[in-house]
Amino acid sequence: MDRGARGRVRLRAAARRHGVRAQPELGHAARPVHRRAHRLRVGVLLVLLWMLPFWALAGFAFHRALRGGWLGHWLLLGLAIGMSLWAKYFVVVLAVPLAVFIVFDERARKSLATPGPYIAAAVALATMAPHLVWLVRNDFLPFSYAEHRALPSRGLIDHVWHPLQFALGQAFFLVPSVLIAMPLFFPRRRAQKRGGDAFDRRIVSWLAFGPIVTVMAMSALSGRGTVAMWGYPLFLFLGLWLVLTAPQKFEAIRIRRVIAAWAAVFGCLAVAFIANYALLPNYDHRYRAVFFPGADLARELSQRYRAATGRPVIYVIGSMWDGGNVAHYAPDHPRVLIDGKPARAPWIDLADLRSKGAVVVWTDGDLNAVPPGLRSVAVDAAVQPPFVLRDRRRDSSINVGWAILYPRPSFAVRSSH
């Protein structure tokens, strides 16, 4: 039995023991979820709300622990790192630079002679322990999501290009922040003494740039690609670094200029957003995902499936985009077998899917034949006449192919024996 199959068996066994469906979020801990909980489509929001405060708390505790040496701050640091892991494994790119700083900074290294760093490590491991146990028992199943997202290396050039591409993308996203901070540096005058000493600046500089350097180093060593949105927590301390390194005092005129720059940048972003979605589509006719008629697609498939089978849609087989839109907007909120691959949705019981039936959906390729990628679980699906939907702007259309995998109750009976 392969790793994915073992993980699916364990997930379903845990669900049966608790009388619920196991529906883990990709990239996070698998958690038993009540059958109605899948209607709460807040995974990304929860990650943001959970990750960022603990990332910031870890930075605060790290600085205070090194400056004051109070064991409570070391304990807080371990707790913040441990809790961050429950939201996103990405916290490793913060934890590694913190450890490196303690080892190689002469002043920070003195803390190794105290119990503090070891208490932080022990608390972090204790906080992570339940999830680490789950990872081992389930063959590190969530890592398949990162494996799927990170582009493979095509050769030596990608060991250079992929980290450079990530750095250039993040630099572009930082342009608004830099523009807002410019009044703190210009017009230049004779440098004036500011708060904080050299040790403070080293700590904050490490917090601000250590994580992105770690991501780039990992990409350079592996040659794997990165995703631009992975950079969202990396520069959480950039604002603090800018304030700490600004050579001028915060005079009233500079504060007013910062506020004016912020208003201008925010206004430009708002105008660009409106132009991109309200004006430019009239001229560039470029595809924009926000105009995809997800609600119409879900309604049409739900109605057509019910008319053909007399049942609500319980499962949908399709891409993450097509199937996800149906699952979100359909009144019955079916579960998605992503890309028709059980490994992408290990919480789905294929026997249950077969017994209750599914709708298969695709929006590219031959609309009169089930795509090859979906045939492994839908080879005997009955292809239905394709249909056309207008997008949200009503100025272009989406061609939809679909098929019905008819319910086979006897399949579940045979499987149970």
Image: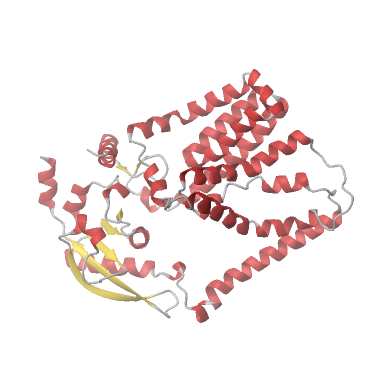
- Using the rendered view, name the quadrant where residue 271 is placed: bottom right
> Looking at the image, which residue is at 64% across and 44% down?
209
Looking at this view, is 358 or 180 the one in front?
180
Relative to residue 152, is residue 361 depicted above or below? below
Percent coordinates x, y for residue 270 in the rendering: 62, 67
> Looking at the image, which residue is at 58% across and 40% down?
55
Q: Is residue 275 left or right of residue 159?
A: right
- Report the residue that reaches farthest toward the right: 190
Q: Which image quarter is the N terminus in?
A: top left
Q: Is residue 111 left or right of residue 297?
A: right
Percent coordinates x, y for residue 27 in the rendering: 42, 44
- Using the rendered view, name the quadrant where residue 312 is placed: bottom left
Q: How many marks?
A: 0
Relative to residue 294, is residue 34 depicted above or below? above
Looking at this view, is 16 or 393 the one in front?
393
Residue 274 in sight from this viewpoint: yes
Image color mode = secondary structure
Q: Which image quarter is the C terminus in?
A: top left
Percent coordinates x, y for residue 212 in the rendering: 58, 46
Percent coordinates x, y for residue 330 in the rendering: 33, 62
> Looking at the image, which residue is at 86% across and 52% down?
251
Looking at this view, is 192 or 68 the one in front?
192
Residue 26 in sight from this viewpoint: no
Q: Is residue 228 left or right of residue 299?
A: right
Relative to residue 103, is residue 6 depicted above or below? below
> Looking at the image, which residue is at 18% across and 47% down?
351
